[in-house]
Image: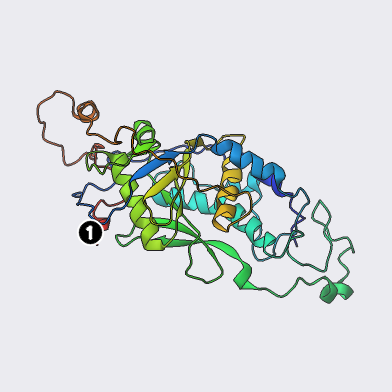
Amino acid sequence: MPQPPLNIQKYLDHTLPHLNEKYPPGTGGTGARSDWSEGTLKGIEVVPNFGLLVKDYIDKFPAQAVNPSPYAKYPKQVQVARELPDPLRTTGDLQKALATLPLAGIASVLTALESGPQGYPVKNRVDAAGYESDGGDDDHEEERASAPRDESKEWHWRYSKSPMGSGELLLVKGETDSVNMVVRTINSAAFTAADWDEYVVTGPYNYNTKSKASWYWSRMWGACKRLQTRYFVLTDWNRWSFGCFNEDQSHAWISPVLWYNAMGPTILESLFYWAQTTKGAQNGFPLKEKDVSALAALFPSNPARRVSVSGNKGHVARDPTQPRAANESDIEESDAEDNA
């Protein structure tokens, strides 16, 4: 049965459900970190008013309901929330959760809007409860049929693997190879709250292999170059940050960290705004660079962070029967990826 018309503003105005985490300690790559001679990133700029930009865009978006495509149905949030993996034990669980709820919802909305402000063209009429207004008379089945499927107008998230096998979710339209945005995941057992604080900063970029935040910026730069996209999202489900690069990838913008249960804007609203920006939508994110060269260089070596992990104890041999403890090199993906 066709889904009822979707009020986009109301649909996006929902927080994500809470998911527990039970990642094993020490998960993530620990390989050698290489030189980054190809890197062109010079500066990073936090967008302090990101939330206001999103809300302004959502508030100005047309309020009428749209018809969803029968080939890209929107997930019913309460129902789907019960089907999400909980707790999250692996990055595969995280990627499944992302694809099932927030990303599938955004793809459905984008696909509906491809056919215009009224949404997908259907000949039958569906009321708010999801029932066909003609009573479902089989004599009118042909009349009620939807318009022919046009896969070239369908937005979806394509699961992909980086050269070393780490998963990423790519926003694409139809079967094209053009990537509008990449969503990359991070393991919260290896990328801590302190690492997020170091990652979302303003200033001249400094490549430092001893800083996980600096290292992951270089990885995001490499992923966007490889995928030929400027827009990205980094998340561990609890925390989200939205970013993009300028044309030559010498300057980056990054949003403050948004939590899964954020309101004003919600994660769904932010994802929609970011997706619309990648399509060149009017009132999307304005790419205005701020000169950050005079600020203190980012990501200096921080011995205190290393001491906080190793302490002042002497070397103690690891018990091979026990899981490895997380260390400063641990991130969700293999550190050797850029050497491929």
Residue drawn at (22%, 46%), measured in percent from left and top? 30
Give the residue type that dot 1 points to. Asn
Quarter assignment of residue 276: bottom right
Residue drawn at (53%, 72%), measured in percent from left and top? 175
Which residue is more in the foreground, 174 or 159? 174
Total labels: the figure holds: 1
Q: Position of residue 143 (x, y in %)?
A: 85, 74
Relative side of 8 to 307, left or right: right
Residue drawn at (61%, 48%), measured in percent from left and top? 80
Q: Position of residue 272 (x, y in %)?
A: 60, 50
Label 1, on which residue? 339
Q: Position of residue 205 (x, y in %)?
A: 31, 42
Which residue is more in the foreground, 61 or 74? 61
Quarter assignment of residue 140: bottom right
Q: Image quadrant for the N terminus?
A: bottom right
Is disc 1 surrounded by few (<14), some (14 to 19) or many (20+) residues within 10 Å? few
Colour scheme shown: rainbow
Q: Is residue 235 visible?
A: no
Q: Residue furthest top?
A: 312
Q: Is residue 265 above or below residue 158?
A: above
Q: Image quadrant for the C terminus?
A: bottom left
Q: Is residue 10 above or below residue 140?
A: above
Q: Is residue 248 above or below residue 178?
A: above
Q: Position of residue 163 (x, y in %)?
A: 31, 62
